[in-house]
Amino acid sequence: MQTLPAFKLVLWTSLTLASLHFGCGAKCSGTNSPTVKQTQLEFKNPPKFMVEVQNNCPMCPVIDIHVKCGNFSQALVNPRLFKVLAFDDCVVNGGLPLGPLQKLSFNYSHQKYLMHPTTWYFQCE
């Protein structure tokens, strides 16, 4: 009769691990994609903008966020925060993770660059 409790333990453990792996809760998808928001802080010439990049997933970190950034000048911001890789390709946080719902922000003074995320990866386990 010892096999019944052992069987229940194995079954319960298997179901628990399967639910963690396949996710009974909501995993991140396109509806949780990272966003880039720009707010104008000063209206001088040149204007000053604050950029906020946010991971909108409540469950998983997001990594390797690439942003369409036009001809953004690297001289405007620390490359550890926002690095220009090529024309129209910038990477956020050196490709390192932004935790669930985490924001990263920086300021620049220049005419406004149009920015939006192009690629990223959710790091759900």
Image (cartoon, grey):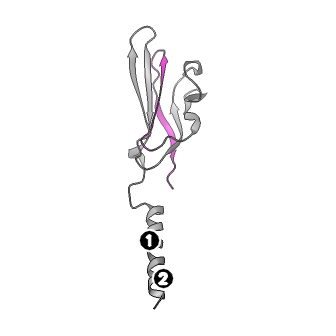
Crowding near the residue tagged with mark 2, few <14, some 14–19, many ≥20 C-alpha atoms within 10 Å: few
Question: Is residue 107 shown above or below 85?
Answer: above
Residue 49, percent from left and from top = 43, 19
The residue positioned 59% from the left and 35% from the top of the image is 94
Precedes in sequence: disc 1 or disc 2: 2
Crowding near the residue tagged with mark 1, few <14, some 14–19, many ≥20 C-alpha atoms within 10 Å: few
Q: Which residue in the rendered view is the most extreme toward the bottom?
A: 1
Question: Is residue 19 shown above or below 104?
Answer: below
Question: Is residue 68 shown above or below 96?
Answer: above
Q: Is residue 5 magenta?
A: no
The residue positioned 57% from the left and 24% from the top of the image is 78
- Looking at the rendering, the stretch of residues picked out in magenta corresponds to 100-125
On the rendered structure, is 30 left or right of 86?
left
Q: Nearer the viewer, residue 99 or 24?
A: 99
Q: Is residue 113 magenta?
A: yes
Residue 125, percent from left and from top = 51, 56
- The type of residue carrying mark 1 is Leu
Location of residue 4 by image quarter: bottom left
Residue 19, percent from left and from top = 43, 65
Marks 1/2: CA–CA distance: 14 Å
Name the residue tied to disc 1: 15
Q: Quadrant of the N terminus?
A: bottom left
Q: Secondary structure at mark 2?
A: helix
- The type of residue carrying mark 2 is Ala
Q: Secondary structure at mark 1?
A: helix
Residue 122, percent from left and from top = 49, 48
Residue 6: image tag: 2
